[in-house]
């Protein structure tokens, strides 16, 4: 399975924000591939302990991917960045 395609929107000491870029006819959405996205961000050093992860989904809504100990936990809808 292919990993979702995303781009980095912003990064600070407390949060990382990404955007789902698709095309969704060829790649899963960030929502459907959240585990792979978190793994990639952690492995690349873009997401560290204590940082929150926000994403603009395929419809443009901003939600949060809750991460603990470097692993996907759950989604938090309607998060504010």
Image (spheres, helix red, strand yellow):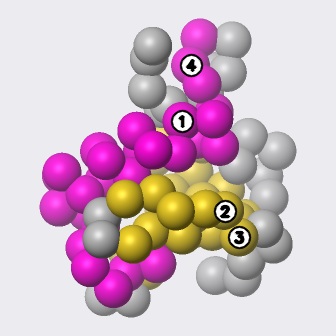
> In which quadrant of the rendered view does residue 31 lie?
top right
Of the residues tagged 3 and 4, which is closer to the observer?
3
* Whole-percent x, y for residue 51 in the image: 37, 81
**Pointer 2 residue:** 75
Circle nearer the N terminus (2, 1): 1
Say what secondary structure mark 4 lies in: loop
Q: CA distance from mark 4 to mark 2?
A: 20 Å
* Whole-percent x, y for residue 49 in the image: 26, 79
Give residue 76's mark: 3
Q: Answer yes or no: do the residues labelled 3 and 2 have beta carbons within 8 Å? A: yes
Q: Measuring 45% from the left and 44% from the top, which residue is drawn there? A: 35
> In which quadrant of the rendered view does residue 32 lie?
top right
Say what secondary structure mark 1 lies in: loop
Q: CA distance from mark 3 to mark 4?
A: 22 Å
Q: CA distance from mark 3 to mark 1?
A: 15 Å
**Pointer 1 residue:** 33
Circle nearer the N terminus (3, 1): 1
- Label 3 neighbour load within 10 Å: few <14, some 14-19, many 20+: few
- State the extent of the magenta-drawn residues as a range: 26-53
Q: CA distance from mark 2 to mark 1?
A: 12 Å
Quadrant showing the C terminus: bottom right
Q: Measuring 60% from the left and 25% from the top, which residue is drawn there? A: 28
Compared to 58, does 81 lie above or below?
below
């Amino acid at each position: 399975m292919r990993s979702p395609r995303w781009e980095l929107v912003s990064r600070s000491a407390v949060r990382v924000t990404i955007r789902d870029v698709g095309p969704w006819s060829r790649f899963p959405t960030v929502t459907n591939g959240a585990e792979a996205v978190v793994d990639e961000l952690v492995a690349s050093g873009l997401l560290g302990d204590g940082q929150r992860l926000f994403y603009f989904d395929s419809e443009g809504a901003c939600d949060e991917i809750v991460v603990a100990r470097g692993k996907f936990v759950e989604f938090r809808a309607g998060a504010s960045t």
